[in-house]
Image: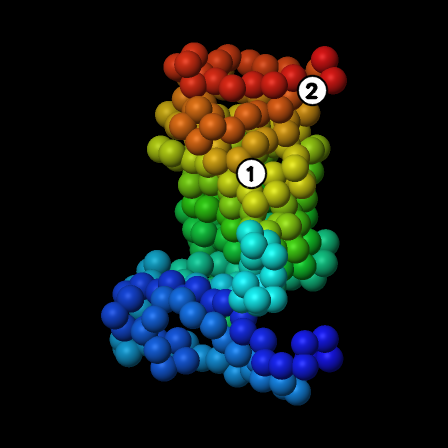
Amino acid sequence: DGLSGRDINFVYTFTATPADKWTFNGSSASSGTVTIGKGDTTKSVYAKCSKDSLDAGEGYILTIETPDSSMALPGSSMVLAEFRYIQGEITWVGPPGGNFLELSNWKIGETTVTDSDLWTHSTLVIPGNSTPVFDANSEPTGYQAIGIKKLIIQNGAKLSVTTGTTSSSRFISVEGGIECKGTGCIDASSGTVLFSGTTSTFKADYPELSSFGNVRIDNSSTFQPQSAMYISGTFDNSGGGTYDAVTNSVTTYFTDSTAISGNASDETKTKFHILNA
């Protein structure tokens, strides 16, 4: 208001399932603008569903982007915030630097998760500005890996993954992939990430903010990154999984000390670059 002296239109995108049961601010449109009036400091918006109860995977995702083109340079649009509710998704509610493996740090809606909720194949969402820490040494006895369906790291959030090696019995396993939105990132420079499931991926708006120490591809998986990756420790594909960076035309960056085990099952789908060699 102080800068513009006029109303400001923020662009939104509203994606919902089932689409015909949801409205945003009374409209069924999937995109539009939210206007912050001159002199206003807050704006109330609402999503409404006409379905009595949601099935797993149903819900909405609302993204708010930088103002319309009259207020921004072409191509400079950026997501400012994302609000979401997907039935069955698990959201981080823990303190800064909190233990990723502490059940009380996660909720489904307003309900604290149970043991089976977290350890079975679920989508985990880390909201903006959250900083959980996954310490493999704090993993409960009897668990070889934490199997996650998908990990979503929101703008401004950071997941740190510490300890664990590809030969260790303790690591974080992601079936569907990791998605880092905005400046969201994963720092696994001293940890291990296993990409498993039929098809898994890594996607980041700013991939240079994320780093991996040890990466392992499961023997029955196709790992198809959508963004560049930076690996400093080990890259292990000795089990015979498929590494495919060509489909999305991305590069995996290694340091001169990265240890590589195995290769992609299709040599035409490898795309490596050695840094500082």
Location of mark 1 (residue): 172
Front tag of 1 and 2: 2
User: What residue sits 52% from the left and 32% below the top?
Assistant: 194
What amino acid is labelled 2 in the image? Leu
Q: Position of residue 116 (x, y in %)?
A: 44, 53
Q: How many marks?
A: 2
Pick out the residue farthest to the bottom.
39
Left-right relation of 270 to 214: left
Quadrant of the drawing holding the N terminus: bottom right
Q: Position of residue 196 (x, y in %)?
A: 44, 33
User: What residue sits 53% from the left and 35% below the top?
Assistant: 227
Left-right relation of 39 to 118: right
Locate residue 275: give its quadrant: top right
Left-right relation of 247 to 209: left
Left-right relation of 203 to 53: right
Find numbered disc 1 in the image and state the secondary structure of the residue it sits on. strand
Which labelled disc corresponds to residue 275? 2
Quadrant of the drawing holding the C terminus: top right
Q: Position of residue 158 (x, y in %)?
A: 66, 49
Q: Give the camera-side residue of 79 and 171.
A: 79
Q: Give the camera-side residue of 6 and 225.
A: 6
Query: Is residue 142 among what the camera can see?
Result: no
What amino acid is labelled 1 in the image? Ile
Instruction: Name which of mark 1 and mark 2 comes first in the sequence.
Output: 1
Q: Give the camera-side residue of 149 and 127.
A: 127
